[in-house]
Image (tube, rainbow, N blue to C red):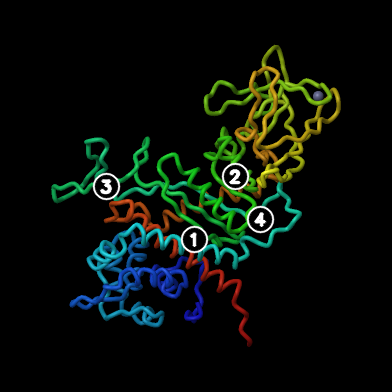
Amino acid sequence: MSGITHRYDFDRHLAVAQRLEILAWDVLFSLAAETVKQAAASYGTKTKKTATDVKGMLIFGAASVMYGSDRAAAAELRYAWHRLAPMLRRAGVEVSDRAPDEAAWQYFRRTYLSDPDLVEQLWELVRETSLGMALEMGIFPEPSTEHRWLHPDHLATVYADGTWVKPASSVGIKRGRVVHKSRSTTGRPRLSDDVDTSGRNHGYQHTVILARRPEKRMQLILDVRRAAPSRDVKVAIESVLRLRSRLGDRLRHFAYDRALSSHDDITRVMRAGILPLTKPGNVDAFDDWKQLKGRRIRLDRKQKKAIPFDYRFDDGCFHHLAIDAGMLWDMNNAGGVLYYGKRAEHREIRRVDRADGSYDFEIDMRLHCRRSGDHDFTWSLTGEVPRLNHRRPLRLATHLRPFPIAETKVSGPALTVRQNAESNFKRMKDFLGLGRRARSFKALDHEIDLLLVTIAHNALVWAEYQQRYQEKPKAA
Ligand SMILES: [Zn+2]
């Protein structure tokens, strides 16, 4: 970063050229360029003189994603080249007086970058380097022994979300033998034959893993992985477990959307010592639960069903209970119909060691009872509770959430973080123009786009972090 002498106004919108300047100085980007350079040793040795070197070509690639198309990038760079070229030279990029064009980039990508092994090697570099950045930014602080599990904040937490990237709009999608939506002008449909099609989605599904500091924009992408349809949760968990093996107890929480709801997935995360932050599976809006109190139990709608069960506490007291919106409710029985009564209080969460070296989480709960005072009880979050009206016990991981969404003091910070992450994904996609990118027909092309986006995104965060939090004030 030392090469950048002036300050950026990160609170305002940065011009693409400014982002490219930051990128050119970025450490991770420079390392990535070195890696590509080794693989592309023959680049620039041909008779025709190239407009720029490997690093410069990668800058063109990043510009292409940011501007939304190769042609737009070529036009913008051509226009701004007299200002950009000296700046790029200062950052160690070899450039001539003419800007690289889209043909040069497409040739470069096809010839030197479109190698799955090289792309994976670059992702590995991104994972390693961004994790180092995250540590340096204090996102995963030294773990304290007295971690308050019921009160997470932004730190020590990774977020993930699945995201679909569509192939360029003019590309045909083959469903069986039928080609849809090819707007080819040459009569030969340009086919994207490796897209995933599932339901109404088509394109390439990826799982993005992030971590953040609480301040605005201070969010790093730690990993991006391609996921086959409906495999996004598994892919996210693999990535989180890998981070856990690197970070140990510096990583405490994993925030994901409600797709993380199966007993096996949640148990796997908890066994690794990580407490998931997820919205309950049968809730859309955060205040859905408000409508429940005093109402008749909801059993009719398939997706939003409550789970009623009859239960006897240790002192013999019998209750009609239900789990709904991730919380435990005492139900009032009026003429055989159940109505929502009081909610059980979440009092504390503890992580406990298991004999095999893995972990479990226990929750202390309290249910107010008019007949016999408060019931205080402890359940394992991966465990089961017996049901008097059912042969099989109830598995809690699927239904009971550690953080009750009704208690905003407890769940607020955790779930707001989760919501922020979601809106950031959207912003990232809009801002970086993914999905409108022309000439990216194949999975590997999108992989390369996403790689450049990720590096560019982290470069901006890192530069802002350095400028805002690391620079010593200058002496007067
Ligand atoms: Zn009771």
Q: Find the distance from the CA under tag 2 to the CA under tag 1.
A: 20 Å
Question: What residue would you read off at disc 4?
Answer: 249
Q: Residue 327: where, in percent of width, then height? A: 67, 33
Camera-nearest residue between 18 and 115? 115
The residues tagged by marks 4 and 2 sit, at their Cα atoms, a distance apart of 13 Å
Label 3 to label 2, Cα distance in Å? Answer: 35 Å
Q: Earlier in the sequence, mark 2 or mark 1?
A: 1
Please give the label number shown on residue 269.
2
Q: Which amino acid lies under the numbered mark 2 shown in the image of this protein?
A: Val
The residue under the point 54% across, 61% down is 217
Residue 311, quarter of the rendered image: top right
Residue extending furthest toward the top: 335
Mark nearer the N terminus (3 vs 1): 1
Label 4 is placed on what type of residue?
Asp
Q: Position of residue 442 (x, y in %)?
A: 30, 51
Q: Which residue is mark 1?
A: 127
Task: Select label 3 or label 1 by which is in front.
Answer: 1
**Residue 60 placement, left or right of 149:** left
Question: Residue 18, image x and y in percent?
Answer: 42, 72
The circle on residue 192 is: 3
| Image mark for residue 273 | none
- First reached walking from the N terminus: tag 4 or tag 3: 3
Task: Determine if the C-beta at disc 2 is less than 8 A from ligand 1.
Answer: no
- The amino acid pointed to by label 3 is Ser
Residue at the extreme front: 356
Indicate the quadrant of ligand 1 in the picture: top right
Q: Nearer the viewer, residue 10 or 36?
A: 36
The spot of residue 370 in percent (x, y) is: 83, 24
At mark 2, the secondary structure is helix
Which of marks 1 and 4 precedes in the sequence?
1
